[in-house]
Amino acid sequence: MLKRLFCALMMFGTALIVAGCTTTKTDLAAATNPLRIGVASDYPPIIFKQGGVIAGMEADLAVNLAKNLNRPYQFVETSWDKLIPDLLNGRIDIIMSGMSITEERQVRIDFCNPYLKTGQMALIRRTDAARFQTPAQIMMNRSDVGVQKGTTGAQLVRQQFANAKEVAFLSAHDAALALSRNRIDMLIHDAPVIWWLASENEATLTVANHTLTEEYLAWAIRRDDSKLKDSINQALEKMKSDGALNRIFKRWMPGAP
């Protein structure tokens, strides 16, 4: 009787060990697979190339996120308009490229909890500051308005700037250059980008000090990737509580109010 009981206990213990080993192997495999991070690296200060290396606010956030997830990471560069297709076809695991939450995007993809409240703002020439002192003056003026193709800024101009002529550019940098050369009258883009461009061109350009929309930036994942979403949301809460999020914001958006 004792011998049979001992054998049963041994078999039960072995089953527990095997189950434990299986879980450990699964977790280990997940931890060693690199997190493939989709970026469109032409979006300073959010994400861009600096000396040939991917840098910016999202790059710092990615490093911190991967550390909290205990996973290696890999940046996968693509163009802005290919970020969502690349996510859906499995080429990347997450979009970390300053993407804002919109209903249109939520039809196709899911978002983690937002990490930054922002909005659209206007970059203008210093000599035109008197023309654009209120949101109404910005949105109702008969102007050539620059936007970056495929952004929420472009969507805003199309829907709300009734008298404007939309001029699309491949990058915010190209649009700012056109603004400096009097080819357009303003650039509409996310607030962090506008602050950055103003600081880079402070002799000639300035920010029209009104936020035109209320938006939230968040990291995008596939709709069926709920386990990754939960892990990322937990990591984000830790980054908020330990101050890492604010330190990164202050580094890349020093001029933000």
Image: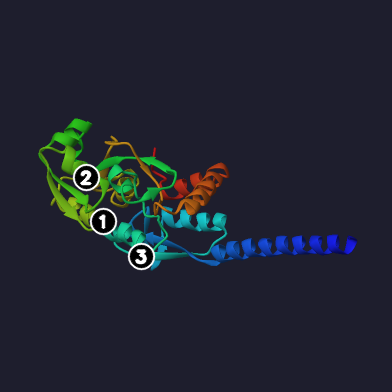
Q: Residue at x 28, y 41 (%)?
A: 120
| Amino acid type at image mark 1 | His
| Figure quadrant of residue 42 | bottom left
Q: CA distance from mark 3 to mark 2?
A: 24 Å
- N-terminal of the pair, mark 2 or mark 1, is 2
Can you say whether 27 is above or below 135 in the image? below
Q: Is residue 78 left or right of residue 130?
A: right
Q: Is residue 100 left or right of residue 165?
A: right
Checking the image for residue 77, the label placed there is 3
**Which residue in the protein does label 2 denote?**
155
Checking the image for residue 206, the label placed there is none
Q: Is residue 196 visible?
A: yes
Mark 2, secondary structure of its residue: helix
| Amino acid type at image mark 2 | Gln
- N-terminal of the pair, mark 3 or mark 2, is 3
Q: CA distance from mark 3 to mark 1?
A: 18 Å
**Which residue in the protein does label 1 denote?**
173
Closer mark to the observer between disc 3 and disc 1: 3
| Amino acid type at image mark 3 | Glu
Instruction: Name the one closer to the observer, 18 or 174.
Output: 18
Determine the residue located farthest toward the front in the rendered image: 1
Q: Position of residue 14 (x, y in %)?
A: 74, 64
- N-terminal of the pair, mark 3 or mark 1, is 3
Q: Position of residue 222 (x, y in %)?
A: 39, 54
> Mark 1 and mark 3 in contact (Cβ < 8 Å)?
no
Quadrant in which the N terminus appears: bottom right
